[in-house]
Amino acid sequence: MEDERIIALYRKRDEAAISETEQKYGALLRRLAGNILADRQEAADCVSDAYFQTWNSIPPQYPQKLCPWLARLVRNNAIDRWRSARALKRQCELTLLLEELDECVPAPQSVAQEVEARELTEYLNAWLATLSKDDRILFMRRYWNGEPLTALARERGIQPEKLAQKMYRLRRVLKAALEKEDILL
């Protein structure tokens, strides 16, 4: 079913919207949450929470594209769950992932910096557009989807160490570009 029809079902408050959403995007969303969380049940719960949030948000909001809307909700839910678990465990693959980006992407500290965060998002999108398609996909799969470096390296038929070097170089290019635009402190 097309996204427009699914969104129309949400607007009508038709419960079929959730089953259609699950049928079309469920596996993708669970994989996204699973890349962040180590527990399948936790990942499934994040997806369910996103369906609930979508049900409560449409209307009044109307996403132009349903998949990115859902992916953002699932990713945010998974990161929130990860942070809660991290408060207890203090160690996770996502810690390393976020630390890798800490050196080049500043995190907003307050609501007042939300505008700056939006500008950063626009700049990051423009920077990603300058990369080759392969590098852009690799960067997004690693840092947005949270896919393990070893899995990405295996898929590409290279050693994880070599891919780690490539990711390091991409982060250095990003950092230099952000510094050039005076985006970093």
Image (cartoon, grey):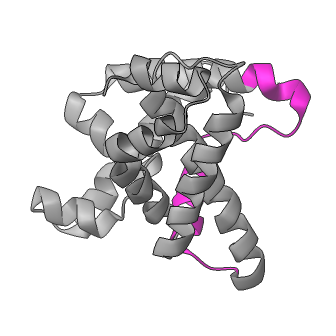
Q: Position of residue 103 (x, y in %)?
A: 61, 49
Seen in the image, is 160 located left or right of residue 145?
left
Q: Position of residue 106 (x, y in %)?
A: 69, 39
Residue at left 62%, top 79%?
Answer: 91
Residue at left 37%, top 43%?
Answer: 25
Q: Is residue 168 visible?
A: no
Seen in the image, is 34 located left or right of residue 161?
right
Q: Nearer the viewer, residue 162 or 94?
A: 94
Q: Nearer the viewer, residue 142 or 56?
A: 56
Residue 126 in which image quadrant: top left
Seen in the image, is 173 located left or right of residue 45?
left
Instruction: Indicate whether 38 appears above or below 50.
Output: below
Q: Which residues are magenta?
A: 90-116
Residue 81 belongs to magenta span: no
* Quadrant, the N terminus: top left
Residue at left 39%, top 50%?
Answer: 26
Seen in the image, is 29 located left or right of residue 152?
right
